[in-house]
Image: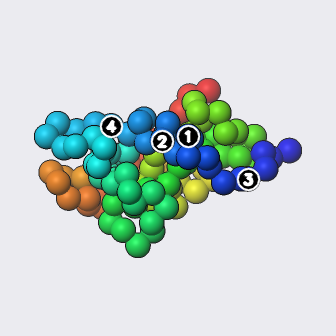
Amino acid sequence: MATERRNFTKEEIEATWKKAVIQPNNNPDVFRKDYAGAWIKKEDYGNVNSIYGWEIDHLNPLENNGDYNQENLYPLHWKNNRKKDKNYPEWQTEISSEGVKNIVKIQNWYIKE
């Protein structure tokens, strides 16, 4: 049976933001990168109208018996989260970066279980 969906707590959002990759010469309290290399902005959490918007992704989706344990939660640019969807253990992301700009770059991911 799938885990029931719920809203994230402020503590979960903060802990997940801390998992984003810190970049040299950038304030880590403002900008970081997701695991696909896309720039995300802390204050743009949940903002799908932002080029730096991000969401919390359940690496193993709730529909696949994933859960809300912090080990399963990752910051992910909202476009990457949409591309990943419910796919696991194989999925794709579509946004990465080149310098200080986000760019379209399809990447394939696989977790060996």
In the image: residue 84, left or right of residue 107 = right
Q: Earlier in the sequence, mark 1 or mark 3?
A: 3
Secondary element at tag 4: loop
Name the residue located 50 percent from the left edge and 54 percent from the top edge: 55
Return the residue nearer the eye: 76 or 26: 26
Q: Mark 1 and 2 residues: CB-CB less than 8 Å, in contact?
A: yes
Q: CA distance from mark 1 to mark 3?
A: 17 Å
Tell which tag, 1 or 4, sits nearer the viewer: 1
Name the residue located 38 percent from the left edge and 57 percent from the top edge: 43
Q: Amino acid at mark 3?
A: Arg
In the image: residue 55, left or right of residue 3 = left
Q: Quadrant of residue 113?
A: top right
Tell which tag, 3 or 2, sits nearer the viewer: 2
- Residue farthest along the top direction in this orientation: 113
Give the residue pinned by disc 4: 21
Q: Position of residue 25 (x, y in %)?
A: 13, 40
Q: Residues within 10 Å of mark 4 (few under 14, many from 20)?
A: some
In the image: residue 62, left or right of residue 77 = right
Q: Look at the picture and state if 101 lies above or below 66.
A: below
In the image: residue 107, left or right of residue 70 = left
Q: Mark 3 and 4 residues: CB-CB less than 8 Å, in contact?
A: no
Give the residue pinned by disc 1: 11
